[in-house]
Image: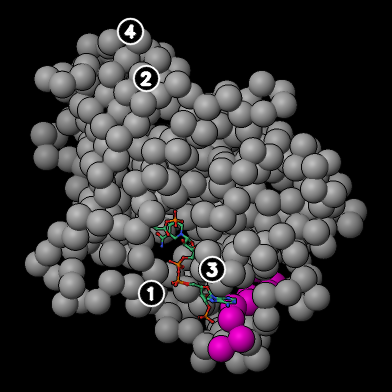
Amino acid sequence: MTAPTHRWPVAVLGATGAVGQAFIRLLEGHPWFDLVEVAASERSAGKSYASATRWLEGALPSAVAALEVKACTPEQVKAPIVFSALDSSVAGEVEAAFAAAGRLVLSNAKNYRMESDVPLVIPEVNGDHLALLTQQRANRGWPGGIVTNANCAVTVAAMALAPLHTAFGVTKVFITTMQAVSGAGYPGVPSLDILGNVIPYIGDEEPKIETELVKLLGTYNGETIVAAPIVTSAHANRVAVEHGHTVCMSVAFERAPTPDQALETLRAWKGFAAVQGLPSAPVPALVVRDELDRPQARRDVNAGNGMAVTIGRVRADNLFDLRLVAMAHNVVRGAAGGSILNAELLVATGQLDGLAAS
Ligand SMILES: NC(=O)C1=CN([C@@H]2O[C@H](COP(=O)(O)OP(=O)(O)OC[C@H]3O[C@@H](n4cnc5c(N)ncnc54)[C@H](OP(=O)(O)O)[C@@H]3O)[C@@H](O)[C@H]2O)C=CC1
Ligand SMILES: N[C@@H](CC(=O)OP(=O)(O)O)C(=O)O
């Protein structure tokens, strides 16, 4: 791991929302990045961040409270590294404008994730896919670029499956999610819809889980991503949990491991080597618990500062080969923290060196 020789100025687009606020919390005191600009919709632009935002958790950093919220244009926002927590209704156009203006956009929105020349990256799982940026710049003529992180529920599934796929070859996975209310942003799901309830539908979520998983676990062949040959089936549910998406999986393999072999593989996993030592990388990335009743969102959501995935209940399956449960913080690992780790990996591997000069 190479630490940068200078601190990078960064901006957050969509800074007033649930994910935007998580960026602000996680960037406070960051060793490599200085948060210098915040931006949101025209409703918020021109106000101080403190007055534009209903701050949700902990103390709002005083330096950020005083920042003026800018409009989301590259003319207004000058930082070379731009974290986007924009609503998907606007992310497509806005993120492209920043990439065309020479900025590196780290996006949480769904808009570009499945484009063939856009990296969809969980650093430990497929950090090598960042190399697609070179094709993206050539294809689109962008001096900057867009790197996306995955849907928050599939992030949990992909991190648990990655070591098992490498070792034993996953062929089928049946996934059921229980997704926290914070996944719907702020103010999100009305309390009278969710309290004491489970809602068996999250718009567009199941297709995203199914398609993003095979791109994440796919192989970069020097030109493109070859999707992993895995048959996927997902059921997505909203539950009355504040933070933490829980994912139950039944998995079939080319070479079926015993539960003990799977546990050993999960415990030993470190993931993509260049991630080790990065400021936001949790150690371990996967926390494997032996208790019969873990993981639990309430107890495990902040493992590894919200960046670790907690796994438990690894056991034989009646339908396929193995079943397990994984859980992680949807707003941290599944969104803002994942983006920050992507940015750290890009900086540490020299992939933003040209940007420094722009
Ligand atoms: N919450 C989660 O767990 C996850 C969310 N994501 C994705 O991250 C993104 C942000 O999600 P989340 O924070 O939950 O959503 P929120 O609804 O809480 O926040 C949306 C943000 O987008 C801004 N915005 C809305 N419309 C415009 C516009 N026309 N121009 C500029 N800015 C605009 C809002 O600004 P204003 O306050 O001014 O309206 C706000 O800052 C979404 O794309 C979401 O799908 C991805 C993974 C997980
Ligand atoms: N849909 C997710 C959060 C989210 O915004 O996902 P995506 O970025 O894939 O749209 C949830 O409701 O929990």
Image location of residue 331, percent across then percent down: 41, 58
**Within 8 Å: ligand 1 and the Cβ of disc 3?**
yes
**Could you classify mark 3 by the number of other residues whose Cα lies within 10 Å: few (under 14), some (14-19), or many (20 or more)?**
few
Q: Mark 4 and 1 residues: CB-CB less than 8 Å, in contact?
A: no
The first of marks 3 and 4 along the sequence is: 3
Give the residue type that dot 4 points to: Arg
Q: Secondary structure at mark 4?
A: loop
CA distance for labels 4 and 2: 8 Å
The residue beneath circle 4 is 255
Location of residue 46 (image quadrant) = bottom right
The residue beneath circle 3 is 89
Query: Which mark, by number, is residue 170?
Result: 2
Q: Mark 3 and 4 residues: CB-CB less than 8 Å, in contact?
A: no
CA distance for labels 1 and 2: 36 Å
Circle nearer the viewer, 3 or 4: 3
The structure residue drawn at horizontal position 64% and vertical position 48%, both measured from the top left corner, is 147
Image location of residue 36, percent across then percent down: 69, 72
Q: Secondary structure at mark 3?
A: helix
**Within 8 Å: ligand 1 and the Cβ of disc 1?**
yes
Give the residue type that dot 2 points to: Val
Location of residue 155 (image quadrant) = top left
Q: Is residue 284 magenta?
A: no
Question: Which residues lie in the magenta part?
Answer: 34-43
The structure residue drawn at horizontal position 22% and vertical position 11%, both measured from the top left corner, is 258
**Within 8 Å: ligand 2 and the Cβ of disc 4?**
no
CA distance for labels 3 and 4: 43 Å
**Could you classify mark 1 by the number of other residues whose Cα lies within 10 Å: few (under 14), some (14-19), or many (20 or more)?**
some
